[in-house]
Amino acid sequence: MRRAAVIASGIVILAWGSALVSAGTRLRSVLPPPKTEIAIARPETPVPVVERRRVRAISPGQFVSPIDGPGEALERIAPRPPLGGEDEEKVKVVLLQRPWSGAAGLLAARGRSVRLAGVMPTAVGRRCPSGSGAPWPCGVVARTQQRMLIRNRTVACEQNGADEKAVLVTVCRVGGTDIGGWLVRNGWAEAEPGSVLAELTSTARREQRGIFGDDPRDGLNSRP
């Protein structure tokens, strides 16, 4: 009886072991294969390249290639002195606020009278001949042209001009334009003999500009 029990127990153990082996085989066929690690090589760190160059010479006698030139140390030099020297006299300027035009070549503002240097003022009562034979009031038109140039702007006059009987004879500008040069160039005033503007008068007379030509108002009056 005891022997039969031992044999039966052995058969059970053998069957249980066979079942475990069979189950393990099935599990291995279901489980995924193990992951394979891939080794990634790190990039090599480049070796820095240091380029050594000398300072390029830039003086006129040694100006060469930045690679082949005989380099030297940089040197900071003192700034150059002002143009014209330190004792150069600055031009003083007097401002005329909305000056009055007495005639082409004459200005006045707040008791200050100015005559444009190098210009012979055109008298307001002057009359000039025209191609039609009838004279026209060129003096009045010349004054009007000067007023239109200045309008209500401020005129800057050089104060170091010469005073002649309480009249300042100097160069005046408006908006950067030399008023005297503009008048002579366009024929609304004549340059003084020997003035640097004399050539402009010759050109204006030759080209019949301003007082040397016809009444510019004729074209305006003939418009419909």
Image (spheres, rainbow, N blue to C red):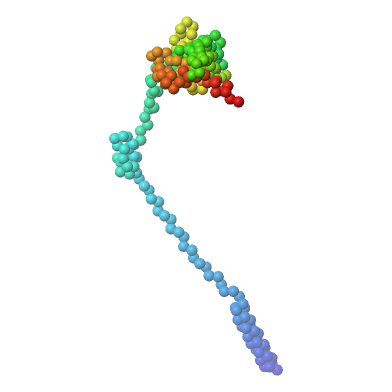
Residue at 47% of width from left, 16% of height from top?
189
Quarter of the picture containing the C terminus is top right
Residue at 58% across / 25% down in the picture? Answer: 223
Within the image, what quadrant is residue 75 found in? Answer: top left
Q: Count of labels shown?
A: 0
User: Residue most toward the top?
Assistant: 165
Q: Answer whether residue 172 is visible to the viewer in this image.
A: no
Quarter of the figure with the N terminus = bottom right
Q: Which residue lies furthest to the right in this view?
A: 1
Give the left or right position of residue 7, taking residue 123 as reference: right
- 170 above or below 82? above
Left or right, 142 with respect to 53, comes to right
Figure check: 63 above or below 192: below
Observer-nearest of 57 and 119: 119
Residue 106 located left or right of residue 69: right
Point out residue 164 in the picture as x, y percentages from the top left corner. 46, 7
Residue 214, image x, y percentages: 50, 19
Q: Position of residue 147 (x, y in %)?
A: 54, 17
- Residue 56 in sight here: yes
Q: Specify the quadrant of the image occupied by residue 59.
A: top left
**Of 132 and 196, which appears nearest the observer?**
132
Q: Which residue lies furthest to the front in this view?
A: 133
From the top left corner, tell me how far across and down residue 52 is, in percent. 35, 45
Depth check: give the residue in front, 2 or 191.
191
Tell me what residue is drawn at x 34 percent, y 44 percent.
53
Q: Quadrant of residue 199?
A: top left
- Which residue is located at x 38 percent, y 27 percent? 78
